[in-house]
Image (cartoon, coloured by chain):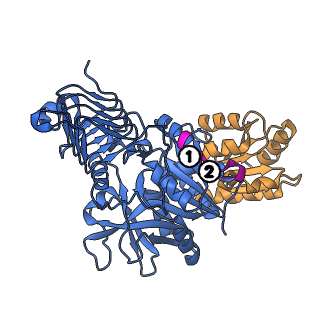
Amino acid sequence: MKSVTTLVLAGGKGERLYPLTRDRAKPAVPFGGIYRIIDFTLSNCINSGLRHIYVLSQYKSLSLSRHIQQGWNIVSGALGEYVTVVPAQQRINEDWYKGTADAIFQNIYLLQKATPDLVLILSGDHIYKMDYRDMIHFHLQKGADVTVASVEMDKELSRELGVIAVDADFRIQGFEEKPETPRTVRSKPDKILASMGVYVFNTEIMVKRLIEDAKRATEHDFGKNVIPAMVASGDRVFAFNFVDGEGQAEYWRDVGTVEAYFDASMDLVSICPLLNLYDTKWPIHTYHAPNPPAKTILCEDTATGGRRGTAYDSIIAGGAIISGGEVRKSIISANVRVDSYARVEDSILLDDVRVREGAKIKNAIVDKYSEIPEGMTIGYDLSDDVKNFTVTESGIVVVSKGFRLP
Amino acid sequence: MATLLIVDDEINQRKLYQEELRDEGYRIQLARNGKEALDSIAEAPPDLVVLDIRMPVMDGLEALGKIIGKERNIPVIIHSAYSSYKDDFISWAADDFVVKSSDLTELKRKIRALLERKQV
């Protein structure tokens, strides 16, 4: 068994998720009612038996550090396991990390003591369920210097992704970051092979290539610089294709924009979501506050103007109370209150949001601790919503954390 | 005439290297620790750095990381009494590693080789 140290890049600013990333790094953005985005990557590690994990943080790392401290103390220190947040320490450079490769290079000393055989590099920004052991097995079988996880995605998304070209043996021939006209998958002209930002490296070759990259004036990015340079220099660079037993592409989402975040969230309230949270063989761990169970109250006769607390096609987290209001196709996070005659539809309410009597919300994301006043409507008149909130091109309204009327 | 920056905390060693390498036809700058070395590089970048590791204030490995981090293409030779530093990942960032010896032939040969490679 090869020794593996896992490094999770969790410094992403997530600018296109603004204002959800106003006060937190992208990996710390809440998702699915009780999780944060990074929980999916960390759960993959734990479920893959990888328990030597450093989380490299950078911008706005407070809520991320707190979450990991509270929720990820599940590994055993006595057995030498750890999930440790490493803030940018400026040991080598006095700048922020210049790119993903620089983030690893600046923390190279973390690998010194253990000197693992392999280093697994992950992004804390993505939502998927993957057994990294399969990829490590593939890496060793191919005798690769580095293996990059790849997944089939729609060709239209190429400008958001790193696109990989492979030969029949899945050795990487080309690696282009965000191309306009991408190389498509053989026999599937509408699909591309996208990099998942997941890399298995032989430790020694990684250190050497990172040093070479550090000396060059590049963007110090794995996708833009290190991997293409390795392909060009003849290193053994392979792609591990993330598919199920039938060869179908597995679920993987970079919820990098408000729209993508909204769509991935709404998938969860469908009858058979693409992302299954109910698989007991692959539990998604997170921090669970000691909240009481969710509750719906009031069951009066609505025909005579009575109040009725109801929820349809929704996820409802602990501590939430739907008190005489109506919730449809929504994600209701911990300790949310939906008061009488209020209506919440096709929306995501994060922790501790209060929707006051008669307020109506649709196609919206309401960030934590916000209070929607009595009778207010959100998502019905976008020209009005723009005055108080962020409205995306596709018409999703985002209410910033802690909103309330003065 | 190429300029070498010699970084060593031991005064007699600095003097020895200065004399021997000046005789080889190099211009010599001196620094007593990593921090002085970085200041010297910032002020007047040399053509090559000969870097001791165990020094007070800032050791050679930390200085090496910072030299690399600035993307400056200055060749660095680690010149240490301890070959065990070869296991340190950051030491791999040096262009060469010479274990200290009273005979400076190897150091001189490697300086020449790196400067020639730089000119090509």
Q: CA distance from mark 1 to mark 2?
A: 7 Å
Comparing A311 with A39, the one in front is: A311
- Which residue appears at 47% of the width and 44% of the height? A11
Magenta span contains residue A71: yes
Q: Which mark is residue A109?
A: none
Image quadrant occupied by the N terminus of chain A: bottom right
Chain at tag 2: A
Query: Residue at left 69%, top 34%?
Result: B35
Tell which chain the image draws in blue.
Answer: A
Residue named by callout 2 = A75
Is A189 covered by the magenta stretch? no
Pick whichever, A130 or A166, lies toward us: A130
- The one nearer the camera, A237 or A43, is A43
- Amino acid at pointer 1: Trp
Give the answer, above or below, for where A137 lies relative to A125.
below
Q: Which residues are magenta?
A: A70-83
Image coordinates of residue A384 in percent, x first then y, are 13, 31
The shade of chain B is: orange
Element at label 1: loop
The spot of residue A46 in percent (x, y) is 56, 57
Q: Residue furthest top?
A: A406
Marks 1 & 2, CB-CB < 8 Å contact: yes
Crowding around mark 1 (Cα neighbors within 10 Å: few <14, some 14 to 19, many 20+) is: some
**Mark 1 — residue?**
A72
Residue A114 lies in what quarter of the image? bottom right
Give the side of residue A191 with respect to residue B23, left or right: left
Question: Which percent across, then down, holds residue A140?
Answer: 59, 73
